[in-house]
Amino acid sequence: FETFELNGMGIARANISDFRFERLTAPDGTEEFWKGDQPGFGVFVEQLPDGYLYLWGCYWTGMFLARVRPKHIEQLGRYEYLVEAPTRTNPQAKPVWDSSPDNAVSLFDNVPNELSVAYNPYLGKHIAIHVWGRENKLVVRTAPAIYGPWSGPETFYEPQRIGEDDLFTAAKEHPEMRQQGGKISYVTYVNSAQYVPVLLQLTWR
């Protein structure tokens, strides 16, 4: 894991009918819209009623937020990045957006790259689900708005280890599978010892 090198994150386009993806070219002529020393946006995407697509990006273990109108998704210069956000110590702070990803603020950390963030109608909150660091713990965070303030992590499941070197990753909810208005959710995660997704059913109380 320590030898991973992140070159950056790009954008690919495909028709839904055939799923033949074409990598797009960034303004600088490369395929990396966001470079290796910037958050890689697109880890998870959600469209909200305000018409924006909100894209989560990861840098090391910190999670950052960008937004763009759907019709401008291929235009790097049209993205905005969250540079100020409400926190638990300052919940009244207003979100501030900027044109540079270098100024983006980390909303929470200890995320091994992948996660899900989506509004849950049953809970009336946004929920984020991810693995906690390199431990065998799946956690949930909540926030009244996508930009926060985000709660601390709450462990809801601890998968059993198969070996000492197991690496748990890729924990995320699949909002399209929800039942009863979000009361029942479905989450998958992966153990590196097997590398097949494990499906969990959650009932929120």
Image (tube, helix red, strand yellow):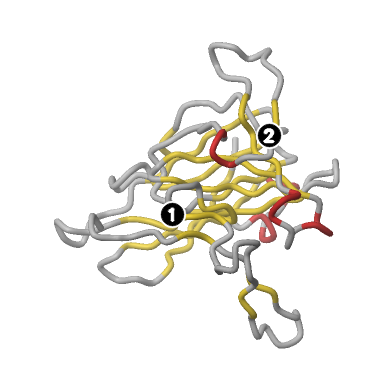
Sequence-first tag of 2 and 1: 1
Asked whether 82 or 87 is in front, the reply is 82
Residue lying at 17% horizontally and 58% vertically, measured from the top left: 165
Residue lying at 75% horizontally and 79% vertically, measured from the top left: 16
Give coordinates of residue 135: x percent, y percent. Answer: 28, 45
Q: Is residue 150 left or right of residue 198?
A: right
Q: Compared with residue 179, is residue 110 higher up or lower down, i.e. above or below?
A: above
* Quadrant location of the N terminus in the rendered image: bottom left
Give coordinates of residue 107: x percent, y percent. Answer: 53, 32
* Quadrant location of the C terminus in the rendered image: top right
Name the residue type under label 2. Asp
Residue lying at 68% horizontally and 34% vertically, measured from the top left: 98
Q: Compared with residue 9, is residue 129 higher up or lower down, i.e. above or below?
A: above
Give coordinates of residue 179: x percent, y percent. Answer: 70, 54
Residue 36 is tagged as 1
- Mark 2 highlights which residue? 98
